[in-house]
């Protein structure tokens, strides 16, 4: 009897070990620190959606000193979250990134100015100081200035660009006439700092038609040539978008899951999640070709990329994932 019990237990342990071994490992590098901007991935892991697809996913937070494009180029990740402009710029320099899914259908970038300040409309930008983050986040801003015909080296006929810190202090301390904010993050930091919505003039990139694609999923073109890796990405995208769908339908729970994984300030994460949900749309992860073309053209016009990109995105992954 003892031998039978031992055999059954051994078989059970072997089965668990086999299942663990059978899970394909995927490393995801985020663009920024742990927050509700990435809730879909944390939810997919927490709810077991990745495991259901036979995946063991490691989620690596980003930060001000972490460039996802460099991480994946160095072999530190299988897939990254990146903005399209940064990915295309990296591709132009030889890192052959390919967009395999586009969870964020709309952009969250805005420029916020105090209503009692000198800027009321775009015509007031000349001669003013405008803040924007760098590390790939500046491309939409430069595309907008280029569209307006404004130089970015300062002077009366252009704008002075302030390399903005990742907070709202440049506006509070009057270092800039306007600063960049995200609808789901820094805008609310301004509100928490004492500004009221009616105190701000906000230029929303999406509303103006100046939006470039933001958080998408990217991997290396060479790796997609391997059918096994492609299949792994199909399963990863399918589980991730299931996570995003759950997160958009259960904002508070998603924010709590983010908190359990290192997010800061629960109220802020809940508010962020409700705003991020507005950018996800139907959670199918499909890239909108027109948005891609607009992004590529903006970079070409600025000469940030030197040639028309080819093969920079594929719909094969999301098509298979949806099936």
Image: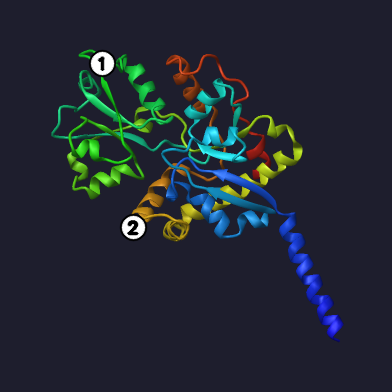
Classify 10 Å Cα crowding around label 2: few (below 14), some (14-19), many (20 and above): few
**Residue carrying label 2:** 267
Which picture quadrant has residue 196?
top left
Instruction: Tell me where residue 123 appears, x and y as whole percent.
Output: 22, 20
In the picture, the quarter occupied by the C terminus is top right
Instruction: Tell me where residue 12 appears, x and y as whole percent.
Output: 77, 71
- Residue drawn at x 78%, y 76% is 9
Residue 323 in view (yes/no): no
User: Up-down: is 224 above or below 126?
Assistant: below
Q: Residue furthest bottom?
A: 1
In the picture, the quarter occupied by the N terminus is bottom right
User: Up-down: is 274 above or below 85?
Assistant: below
Secondary structure of the residue carrying tag 2 is helix
Classify 10 Å Cα crowding around label 1: few (below 14), some (14-19), many (20 and above): some
**Residue carrying label 1:** 158
Disc 2 to disc 1, C-alpha distance: 39 Å
């Amino acid at each position: 009897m003892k031998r039978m019990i031992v055999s059954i237990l051994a078989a059970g342990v072997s089965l668990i070990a086999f299942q663990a071994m059978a899970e394909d490992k995927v490393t995801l590098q985020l663009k920024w620190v742990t927050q509700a901007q990435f809730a879909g991935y944390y939810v997919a892991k927490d709810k077991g959606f990745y495991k259901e697809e036979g995946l063991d996913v490691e989620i690596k937070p980003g930060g001000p000193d972490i460039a996802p494009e460099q991480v994946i180029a160095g072999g530190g990740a299988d897939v990254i979250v990146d903005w399209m402009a940064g990915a295309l710029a990296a591709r132009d320099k030889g890192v052959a990134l390919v967009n395999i899914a586009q969870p964020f259908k709309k952009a969250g970038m805005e420029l916020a100015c105090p209503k009692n300040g000198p800027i009321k409309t775009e015509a007031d930008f000349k001669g003013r100081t405008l803040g924007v983050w760098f590390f790939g986040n500046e491309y939409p801003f430069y595309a907008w200035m280029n569209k307006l015909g404004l130089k970015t080296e300062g002077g009366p006929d252009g704008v002075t660009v302030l390399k903005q810190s990742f907070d709202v202090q440049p506006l509070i301390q009057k270092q800039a006439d306007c600063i960049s904010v995200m609808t789901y993050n820094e805008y609310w930091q301004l509100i928490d700092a004492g500004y009221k919505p009616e105190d701000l003039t906000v230029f929303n990139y999406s509303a103006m038609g100046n939006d470039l694609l933001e958080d998408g999923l990217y991997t290396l073109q060479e790796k997609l040539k391997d059918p096994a890796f492609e299949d792994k990405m199909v399963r990863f995208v399918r589980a991730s978008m299931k996570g995003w769908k759950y997160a958009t339908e259960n904002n508070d729970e998603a924010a709590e899951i983010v908190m359990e994984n290192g997010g800061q300030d629960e109220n802020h994460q809940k508010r962020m999640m409700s705003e991020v949900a507005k950018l996800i749309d139907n959670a199918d992860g499909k890239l909108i070709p027109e948005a891609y073309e607009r992004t590529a053209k903006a970079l070409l016009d600025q000469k940030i990329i030197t040639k028309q990109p080819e093969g920079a995105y594929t719909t094969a992954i999301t098509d298979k994932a949806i099936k």
